[in-house]
Amino acid sequence: MNGIGVSPGISIGKARVIKKVQIALTGILLKDEVSIAAEVERFDHAVNKAINEIEFIKQNTSLNLHEEDIQILETQIEFLADPQIREDVVEKISFGKRNVNDAVIEVIGNMVNVFENMDDEYMRARAADIQDIGNRILKHANLSDHTHAQQFDPDTIIIAEDISPSDTITMGKHVIGFATQAGSKTSHAAIIAKAKGIPAVVGCGDGLGAINNGDIVVLDGAIGLVFINPDQQLIADYTKKKAVYIESVNWLRQLKEVKPITTDGTKITLMANISGADDMEDVFDNGGEGIGLLRTELLFMNRDSFPTENEQFEFYKKVALQSKSKAVIVRTIDIGGDKQLSYFNLPAEQNPFLGYRAIRICLDRTDLFITQLKAILRAAIFGDLKIMLPMISNVQEVREAKNILALAKNELLKENTAFKADVELGIMIEIPSAAITADILAKEVDFFSIGTNDLCQYTLAVDRMNEKITHLYDPFNPGVLRLISNVIDQANKQKIHVGMCGEMAADPLATLLLLGMGLTNFSMGAAAIPVIKNIIINNDLSTAKRICEEVMHMDNSQNIIKYLKEFTA
Ligand code: PEP
Ligand code: MG
């Protein structure tokens, strides 16, 4: 089966199929009265959360709900509040000694069956609503307050319709690969898989539905192939390929202590993109020299409320303490788009990637923003933390953010809390207007970091999540290259730091071109660092400049890619 290879490597393991509601019957029986009472409480809590969630959707005027939609939501609330459902569930818990998951699955399953078999068409259609409320209850009953690793057997390959970024982080060590029906190269799940070195294939389509739990799966994350229950010969071939791949990775890792300096002496900085302190060991193992992007939104996921200032402080402090005094660029919360928080009911939007997200939320919800800024400023005492704002589209946003940063400092002063005042402030350049006005923005900040994942999607009007149009998602489009080149030029001219933390920084095909443009700071998933370092230490800057000169005169990406391939063979 073909898909899009988004994270290289070969996995041979057993399938674990994850359906949208990732909760199955456990068959576990409760042992005592205390656990029975706890399960009943968990059920009531989950129902309340589900009702609140639906109420929120219903009352959200920006959704422009039709009368019929509101009616469906009201029916769902009625079902949720139905004493009969509660009675049935509580009976299963109290007398059947079933846990909430099993009790809800059984009670809701029975109801769905009854409704599906009714003569009346309207009533039959209600079966889907009942299933939906069951899913909601299960979702809320299984949300924990803190991120937790899911339990999987060793050598598990996850097979799913789609995987959220938070699923990817909580997969744990036993997951050795994943394949999804949907997704694209720069979806966050793909980026995180790559950073963790988990082979992954996305966009496989409906064919994945044929895979069952326990099937043997071979996955080639470089070229995007998934084999289900292959014959012994194929398994033997891929076992060999895997060994060769691991050998080449290990060989590259030996470059850990080698400095990334071009053959003519230009020092390059290779940093890593991480999601938390747990990723830090991998960064240093791969020779990373600090953190070019700490994606803080992942700290906000897999919970059921916003982390407090202290919780955030502990999180950033842990990263700072493990950073060996190297720079750590902390990006302020970048939610919205494909990164949603279950407890922060963001309105459904026609174009979420163009909507209420990232810095736009922070400037609107200054309470959330100030809390995060205060936590970062406090943690900055323990390491070289810098603050970076995502999704900046104009200079006013930067100025507003600076004012809020000043307010955060003032609050800390008033509270007599220790913090570092002179923390550097930078912005991501990931919106075309920011790239075009880099000369203006450079006067306002200490550094830029080019986010090619979004810059490419916004410049080319290509949704980075849509697998149908991945062929149009092209960082080598001359339009994208001109924007990148302008940002680097303007930053270098005005002597502010400029780095790149989008996926292009990890693309070996782009390394010499970017060096030639004058980029000296690259940040990427830790696993890619040795590959990029190997290119840097084997080339000189004058060759890179000549390549860049040629490329910038070409009129289409096909020729550009063909030309660049000559230098990366
Ligand atoms: C980017 O847009 O290039 C980037 C690094 O940010 P994210 O992928 O988290 O949107
Ligand atoms: Mg981005």
Image: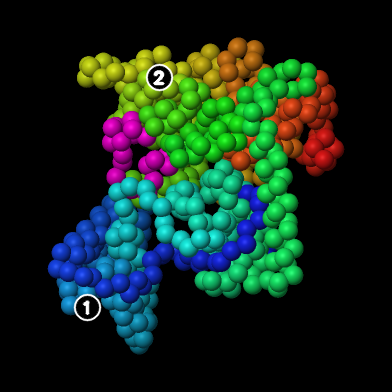
Residue 445: assigned label: none
Residue 548 magenta: no
Answer yes or no: disc 2 within 8 Å of ligand 2: no
Q: Position of residue 313 (x, y in %)?
A: 33, 30
Which quadrant would the C terminus be assigned to in this image? top right
Q: Which residue is mark 1?
A: 96
Answer yes or no: disc 1 within 8 Å of ligand 1: no
- Amino acid bearing label 1: Gly
Decide: few, some or many residues near mark 2? Use Cα within 10 Å; few <14, some 14-19, many ≥20. some
Q: Magenta span covers which residues?
A: 297-316
Apparent side of residue 272 relative to residue 72 in the rendered image (left or right): right
Distance from Cα at disc 1 to Cα at disc 2: 59 Å
Give the camera-side residue of 409 and 532: 532
In terms of image quadrants, where is residue 112? bottom left
Say above or below: 184 vs 97.
above
Q: Which residue is mark 2?
A: 402
Q: Residue at x 49, y 35 (%)?
A: 280
Q: Position of residue 100 (x, y in %)?
A: 26, 67
Q: From the image, state whether disc 1 or disc 2 is nearer to you.
A: 1
* Of pointers 1 and 2, the one earlier in the residue sequence: 1
Apparent side of residue 182 relative to residue 115 in the rendered image (left or right): right
Mark 1: secondary structure: loop
In terms of image quadrants, where is residue 50? bottom left
Apparent side of residue 478 relative to residue 376 in the rendered image (left or right): right
Q: Position of residue 224 (x, y in %)?
A: 68, 56
Q: Residue at x 55, y 66 (%)?
A: 15
Residue 308 magenta: yes
**Residue 365 seen in the figure:** no
Q: Main secondary structure of the magenta part?
A: helix
Which quadrant would the N terminus be assigned to in this image? bottom right
